[in-house]
Amino acid sequence: MNRIALVTGGSRGIGRAIALGLAADGCRVVVNYATSEDAAAAVAEEIRSGGGDAIAIQADVSNEGAVSDLIGKIDAAMGPVEVLVNNAGVTRDGLLARMRSDDWDRVMEVNLRSVFLCTKAVMRGMLKNRWGRIISIGSVSGLAGNPGQANYAASKAAIIGFTKSVAKEVGGRGITANVVAPGFIESDMTASLGEAALEAAASAASVGRLGRPEDVAAAVGYLAGEQAGFITGQVIVVDGGLTI
Amino acid sequence: MERAEIEAKFTQLLVSELGLDEAKINPEARFEEDLEVDSLGVVELLMALEDEFDVTIPDEEAENLATVRQAVELVVAKLAG
């Protein structure tokens, strides 16, 4: 497909699988990372060694100046971003009664503010090209709620409202915006939940297992392609049937 | 840049970027009512103006832009520094 794709938080877990998947589909991929420099470089190298085109660029995507610099670097190195995957996210879990406002703010900054900043920053190029794909990674927590994740769930639910609004604003310009909402996926983020919780999550899913990052990447790859131009403002749940 | 040159380039942009009918474009034409440019179209026009004339138009200055003449005036003022 030869499109230029930016995957925020692309060094590990779901982001890594998305970066590799888009590269396999022919995209030229920017692997953004905040702190995992070696891991991001390894993802870019893996893509290049497979004959693809990729670069790793550091940026805290919750920071407006950093996002502006990031987009400037991508413009100079590759061109305007055509596929944006808002994947960067953190958890700061805790029961609401004990949740610190710092933990609320940080989750909102990284998970939600970054989506606003990055989507706004790539919009100029997409409007000009009359083509674009905005894919934001939500969560079943944002749909069903999850104890201990009031902050995380709120940030992921907010992404849905944001996405639907953007979809309505720019649909006429060939730009789609969608959310992919994973359930429990094997990654560093879910590893901290502990084995018992993950086993319970696996048996609660209709398909009887945890998801793999590649399961999420497949949905993102579909939405990023030419074939998905009539799908916008949607939430595609990738949870093995957990929430049905 | 001469004012006439700015006006000519501006008209070109309206035709090339927004697909407007050149015959309908005149200084008093209103973007939304007369030229049927939607609000996002006005935003796109501003972006095209910034690129074409290498100026920066802050959101607050763009807010009340309603007619072709107002937009040309804004560019003229920006280029005059």
Image (cartoon, coloured by chain):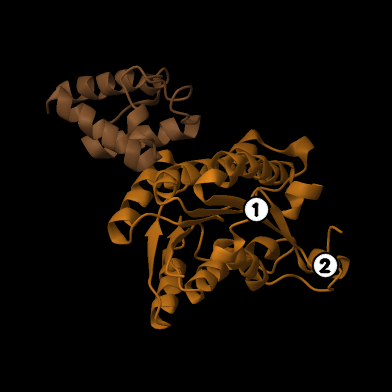
Identify the element where label 1 is drawn.
strand
Residue closest to the eye, B49 or A112: B49
Q: Mark 1 highlights which residue?
A: A179
Count of numbered labels shown in the rendering: 2
Query: Can residue A225 be seen in this snapshot?
Result: no
Q: Residue at x 51, y 69 (%)?
A: A22
The residue located at (63%, 72%) in the rendering is A214
Q: Percent position (x, y) of residue B14?
A: 34, 35
Residue A11: x and y in percent read 49, 65
Q: Is residue B25 left or right of residue A6?
A: left
> Distance from label 2 to label 1 (Cα)?
29 Å
Q: Quadrant of residue A21?
A: bottom right
**Quadrant in the picture for the C terminus of chain A:** bottom right
Is the residue B18 above or below the residue A132 in the image?
above
Q: Residues within 10 Å of mark 1 (few under 14, many from 20)?
A: many
The subunit letter for the residue under badge 2 reads A
The answer to whether the residue labelled 2 contacts the one labelled 1, judged by CB atoms less than 8 Å apart, is: no
Chain A: what color? orange
Chain that is coloured brown in the picture: B
Check the image and report above or below for B50 versus B77: below
Expressed as whole percent of the image width and height from the top left, the position of residue B30 reads 41, 20
The residue drawn where x is 54% and y is 64% is A226
Name, please, the residue furthest toward the left: B1
Task: Kindly tell me whether residue A92 is visible in this rendering.
Answer: yes
Give the residue at mark 2: A196
A128 or B9, nearer to the observer: B9
Q: Nearer the viewer, residue A47 or B66?
A: B66
Q: Dot 2: few (<14), some (14–19), or many (≥20) neighbours within 10 Å?
A: few
